[in-house]
Amino acid sequence: MTATFFFEQGNTPLLISIPHDGRDLAPGLEERMSDAGRSLPDTDWHVRRLYSFARGLDASVLAARFSRYVVDLNRPPSDAALYDGQLSTGLCPSLTFAGANIYVPGESCGVSERRERTATYWQPYHDMLATTLTRIRRRFGYALLWDAHSIRSEVPTLFRGVLPAMSIGTNDGASCDPHWLHAVLHVARESDYSVVLNDRFKGGYITRHYGNPGDGVHAIQLELAQRSYMDEQTLRYDEDAAARLRVVLRAMLNAFLHSADLSFAQ
């Protein structure tokens, strides 16, 4: 079958994971979906394109090919909820963030299908993620994981009000060395973008599962409000806005790399 992800191998300690920009659907799924589901409204639109500058940083990049409506790569295979008291969209979602049905009446993703999707789409992504982090850590002594996301600025079913431009998550400080995080946070806060740390987005399964500083893996999740680089109504990528944002993103990633390199060299 078609590969379930895109992968580019770099030569630095940095791996950028992009789990929610996939648009492909599993065979036979589209005809079972509602109009709302087929429009894939909860896609992290254009994030892979936004981070295309990572080639210049010589980072490794792993990006999903299939939609989060097939299987959500940033959820645990157990399908346990990540945030207490918040609407959980699940491993194989049945509702959009707005609460619309993803499937037409009479259709759903049952237990056996969820198990099959996990094996076919979820597991290969995580196998590559784990393998790449292991390879990087063996080569450099540590690995840096940047989990890249975006979301509409307003999602009333999940959050009140308008989201900040940048939401940085480190599982309440557990997934990354605090000095390395501070270097990244300093760049973000010196920019023109609004920034919060471990607020509404503390990091999903990828950040929580792989981020383990004691084991040499340092993970940061960045959730971008989509208004910072695209038109949220038309879904059009805004070249000018994206170019401005990429200057800051590049500086944040360079700070991550540089602070880690300095600390490890001491």
Image (spheres, rainbow, N blue to C red):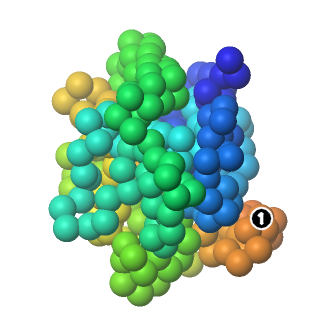
Compared to 20, does 226 lie above or below? below
Compared to 173, does 243 lie above or below? below
State which quadrant residue 45 falls in: bottom right
**Figure quadrant of the N terminus:** top right
Is 149 or 133 nearer to us in this picture? 149
Q: Is residue 60 visible?
A: yes
- Amino acid type, label 1: Tyr
* Relative to 53, 136 lies left or right: left
- Measuring from the top left, give residue 191's x and y in whole percent: 54, 72
Count of labels in the image: 1
Q: Would you name the residue on which mark 1 appears?
A: 237
Q: Residue at x 67, y 63 (%)?
A: 35
**Figure quadrant of the C terminus:** top left
Query: Few, some or many C-alpha atoms within 10 Å of disc 1 (few <14, some 14-19, many ≥20)?
Result: some
Q: Residue at x 23, y 25 (%)?
A: 215
Residue reaching furthest to the bottom: 161
State which quadrant residue 209 falls in: top left
Q: Residue at x 39, y 76 (%)?
A: 157
Q: Is residue 177 visible?
A: no
* Relative to 173, 38 lies left or right: right
- Measuring from the top left, give residue 92's x and y in whole percent: 43, 44
* Relative to 219, 12 lies left or right: right
